[in-house]
Image: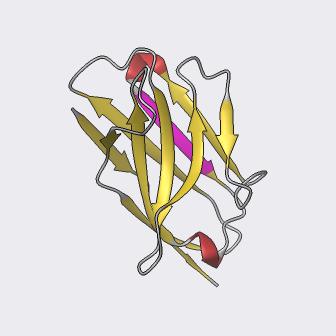
């Protein structure tokens, strides 16, 4: 199982980035996909999640209204569109999968760095 996150980079405050997370190695039917982030010296925090069907999404209060999560089942890929970025959004962003029946996310990607300059 492999999760490949991409799309990170350096952007000015107010700008936008789109992260992608491609999953491979097995079928992920029924799995939720999520994005988390971690700033050095801080704990990892939840950002957003989307159900298998895409009909249900969840966002952290800090990103609600600015970030949008989406997924393409056929491509086993999740996306995180990040708009109106702020310096406090700077972090390594990780994608993850929670298999059916699991209470925790059980597959994790390697992370992609997002840096927002003021």
Q: Which residues are magenta?
A: 77-81
Residue 74, by quadrant, is top left
**Hey, which residue is sitting farthest right in the picture?**
65
Horizontal and vertical percent position of residue 16: 63, 59
Residue drawn 72% across the image and 63% down it:
84
Q: Position of residue 100 (x, y in %)?
A: 42, 20
Q: Nearer the viewer, residue 112 or 1?
A: 1
Residue visible at 75% across and 52% down in the picture? 64
- Toward the viewer: 46 or 104? 104
Query: Residue at 30% of width from left, 43% of height from top?
Result: 4
* Residue 76 within the magenta-colored segment of the rendering: no
Q: Quadrant of residue 56?
A: top right
Q: Position of residue 83 (x, y in %)?
A: 69, 57
55 left or right of 115 in image = right
- Let me know if residue 9 appears in the view: no
Is residue 17 visible to the viewer in this orientation of the structure?
A: yes
| Secondary structure mostly seen in the magenta stretch | strand
- Is 40 placed above or below 28 here? below
């Amino acid at each position: 199982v492999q999760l490949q996150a991409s799309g990170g980079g350096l952007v000015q405050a107010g700008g936008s980035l789109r992260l992608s997370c491609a999953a491979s190695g097995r079928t992920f039917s029924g799995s939720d996909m999520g994005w988390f982030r971690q700033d050095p010296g801080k704990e990892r925090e939840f950002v957003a999640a989307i159900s298998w069907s895409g009909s249900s999404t969840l966002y952290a209060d800090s990103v609600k209204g600015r970030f949008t999560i989406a997924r393409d089942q056929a491509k086993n890929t999740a996306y995180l569109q990040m708009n109106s970025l702020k310096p406090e959004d700077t972090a390594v962003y990780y994608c993850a999968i929670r298999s059916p029946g699991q209470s925790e996310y059980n597959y994790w990607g390697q992370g992609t760095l997002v840096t927002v300059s003021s």
